[in-house]
């Protein structure tokens, strides 16, 4: 599936998403590899099969094998970290902040790509997953490494649009019965 095919599947009520999907992936303050790495990490976080397939297929034209792997790794590790650290942040139990996570996350220290890119991609996944603690940590890292507020905003815009597209496609599949459920009359 291609990005164009995804856009074509969006219903008219989601026209803004269709337009935004085209623009956030092509008009950005980020380098193309950063755009597509953020898109992959966000797609992994958004958990829609068609969106993930389309984004990864298109990203393969903009990222080398190491970049593709690292972007997938950012989405994967944030799937774990965002749940853990969001719980630490929201639980209200100060003791959670004092004890180590005891979760392997070696890929963060050695992602196989520029650290700033991996941090940016992790930020995109964290935005989709809603982990404030992780968003703050990754934002701090990318800014420390020279990225601008506009760069960060562009990564988050990519994440927001990809998440919204995935949400609409999932909802439409549920309404049509394509997800294995009973179709709902419109």
Image (cartoon, rainbow, N blue to C red):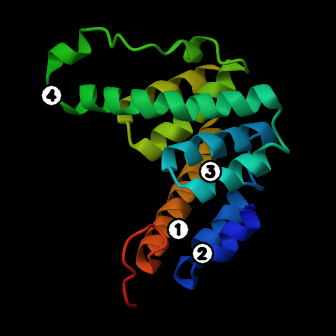
Q: Are marks 1 and 2 in contact (CB under 8 Å)?
A: yes
Q: What residue is disc 3 on?
A: 52
Q: Answer yes or no: do the residues labelled 4 and 1 have beta carbons within 8 Å?
A: no
Q: Mark 4 points at which residue?
A: 92
In the rendered structure, which disc, 4 or 1, sits on the residue that comes first in sequence? 4
> What is the CA distance from the residue labelled 2 to the residue labelled 3?
15 Å
Distance of label 1 from label 3 (alpha carbons): 12 Å
Q: How far apart are marks 2 and 4 (CA)?
A: 40 Å
Q: Which of 148 and 117 is in front in this view?
A: 117
Q: How far apart are marks 4 and 1 (CA)?
A: 35 Å
64 to the left or right of 68: right
Depth check, mark 2 against mark 4: the one in front is 2
Q: Where is residue 30 in the image (x, y as percent from the top left)?
A: 74, 41
Q: How many marks?
A: 4
Q: Where is residue 130 drawn, in percent x and y? A: 39, 43
Q: How crowded is mark 2: few (under 14 residues within 10 Å), some or many (20 or more)?
A: some
Nearest to the observer: residue 133 or residue 129? 129
Q: In this view, does 36 lie above or below 68?
A: below
Q: Is residue 17 visible?
A: yes
Give the mark nearest the N terminus, 2 or 4.
2
Q: Residue 169 carries which label?
A: 1
């Amino acid at each position: 599936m291609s990005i164009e095919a995804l856009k074509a599947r969006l219903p008219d009520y989601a026209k803004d998403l269709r337009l935004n999907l085209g623009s956030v992936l092509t008009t950005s303050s980020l380098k193309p590899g950063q755009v597509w790495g953020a898109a992959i990490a966000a797609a992994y976080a958004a958990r829609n099969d068609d969106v993930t397939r389309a984004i990864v297929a298109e990203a393969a034209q903009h990222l080398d094998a190491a970049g593709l792997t690292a972007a997938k790794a950012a989405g994967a590790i944030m799937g774990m970290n965002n749940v853990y650290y969001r719980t630490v942040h929201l639980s209200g139990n100060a003791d959670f902040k004092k004890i180590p996570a005891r979760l392997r996350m070696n890929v963060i220290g050695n992602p196989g790509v520029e650290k700033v890119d991996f941090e940016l991609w992790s930020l995109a996944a964290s935005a989709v997953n809603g982990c404030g603690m992780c968003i703050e940590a990754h934002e701090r890292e990318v800014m420390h490494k020279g990225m601008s507020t506009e760069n960060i905003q562009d990564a988050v815009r990519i994440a927001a649009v990809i998440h919204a597209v995935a949400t609409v496609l999932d909802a439409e599949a549920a309404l049509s019965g394509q997800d294995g459920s009973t179709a709902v009359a419109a």
